[in-house]
Image (tube, helix red, strand yellow):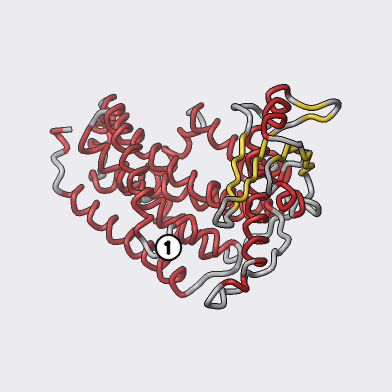
């Protein structure tokens, strides 16, 4: 098809009309601006958001009161730990009083751990953290790390009593939580929000034409309902990969490199096509915006949740592509998404050809 024929095609005119009308939708513009802000300032936002994703990344000293007949063993494993200061107390009662009072002398007590050695040689550790506060999450994370180190230490000391040699535990590898957050949370979020918004806009694009009666006016012109649906679907589905490409460019400007960009765009385009087809179909079937939007939102969230039954969740696929560690399953799922999107779009067009326009 020549460029002039493409520009004069009624479906292209409908697509241009819908894209132009988006600039007047304040909700959509606000959603785009929020995504733009997240992508453009990702290197700054990731610092604060990582504290929610991994509280242990936030620096802060935690003072733990320790008591019990096995407290010496517990204190020994915390000597080389950063962020934990252990205060050994003479008795459980004294430890409980210090914890309730919030400290002893000039030392604050944030949490309490009581370690007692039982008659069979086992060590029972009871940890007590304060009620919900801004520091509670950090305290719980630090206590968990202490207990994990204590468990590993005890296993190593008692290895001679085992009848079978245990599997060696790999050494700790220092890693930044920002890397995991960026590639497993931030990038999938920026890749999946545009398709979800595109599908929601597609619902509005159809139901508003029906509710306002403008769909019948479009039918007066020499276009079919299939042309109208094609134009609206292409306009909405094309927004998502364009947004994703812009977000990837902004991430790159922030020093966050993203690999396999073409495959990521194919994945986003396929998912956008699927949700747009769902939105358009619901719009035609329901004919009313509120009901169609409700069913669309619940349905898409359910569909995304049910993706856990796939060999690899779409978010995992995006993360693996972005970090340049795809597997054969990753490539296969990208192809599957593309084929499924094309097949679903073909089914939707076949459905549209049988819809009675006068009944809408």
Tell me if residue 144 comes above or below residue 167 in the rendering.
Answer: above
Residues 337 and 188: in front is: 188
Percent from the top left, x then y, of residue 184? Answer: 57, 54
Q: Quadrant of the C terminus?
A: top left
Q: Residue at (40%, 57%) from the top-left corner? A: 270
| Residue 13 sits in quarter | top left
> What residue sits right under mark 1 in the picture?
312
Q: Is residue 148 visible?
A: yes
How many numbered tags mark residues here? Answer: 1
Seen from the viewer's position, the closer of residues 274 and 331 is 331
In the image, taking residue 287 as reference, residue 253 lies left or right, namely right
At a point 53% along the width and 34% down the height, the residue shown is 31
Q: Residue furthest right?
A: 106
Label 1 secondary element: loop
Q: Compare residues 187 and 173 and report the one nearer the observer.
A: 173
- Look at the picture and state if 96 lies above or below 168: above
Q: Where in the figure is residue 309, as x and y percent of width and height?
A: 34, 58
Quarter holding residue 281: top left
């Amino acid at each position: 098809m020549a460029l002039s024929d493409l520009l004069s095609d009624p479906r292209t005119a409908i697509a241009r009309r819908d894209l132009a009308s988006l600039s007047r939708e304040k909700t959509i513009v606000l959603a785009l601006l929020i995504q733009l802000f997240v992508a453009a300032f990702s290197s700054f936002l990731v610092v604060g958001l990582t504290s929610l994703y991994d509280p242990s990344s936030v620096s802060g000293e935690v003072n733990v009161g320790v008591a019990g007949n096995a407290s010496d063993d517990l204190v020994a494993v915390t000597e080389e730990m950063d962020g934990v200061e252990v205060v050994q107390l003479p008795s459980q009662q004294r430890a409980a009083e210090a914890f309730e009072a919030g400290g002893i002398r000039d030392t604050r007590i944030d949490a309490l751990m009581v370690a007692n050695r039982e008659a069979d040689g086992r060590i029972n550790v009871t940890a007590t953290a304060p009620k919900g506060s801004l520091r509670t999450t950090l305290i719980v994370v630090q206590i968990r790390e202490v207990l994990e180190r204590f468990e590993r230490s005890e296993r190593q000391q008692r290895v001679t009593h085992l009848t079978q040699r245990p599997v060696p535990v790999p050494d700790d590898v220092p890693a930044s939580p920002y890397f995991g957050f960026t590639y497993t949370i931030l990038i999938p979020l920026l890749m999946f929000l545009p398709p979800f918004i595109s599908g929601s806009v597609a619902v509005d694009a159809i139901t508003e034409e029906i509710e306002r009666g403008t769909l019948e006016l479009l039918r007066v012109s020499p276009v079919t309902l299939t042309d109208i649906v094609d134009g609206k679907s292409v306009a909405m589905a094309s927004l998502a990969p364009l947004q994703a490409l812009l977000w990837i460019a902004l991430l790159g400007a922030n020093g966050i490199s993203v690999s396999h960009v073409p495959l990521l765009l194919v994945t986003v385009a396929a998912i956008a096509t699927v949700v747009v087809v769902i939105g358009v179909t619901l719009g035609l079937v329901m004919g009313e915006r509120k009901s169609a939007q409700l069913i669309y939102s619940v349905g898409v969230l359910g569909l995304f949740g049910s993706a856990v039954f796939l060999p690899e969740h779409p978010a995992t696929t995006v993360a693996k592509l972005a970090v340049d560690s795809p597997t054969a399953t990753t490539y296969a799922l990208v192809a599957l998404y593309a084929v499924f999107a094309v097949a679903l779009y073909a089914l939707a067009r076949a459905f549209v050809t049988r819809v009675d326009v006068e009944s809408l």
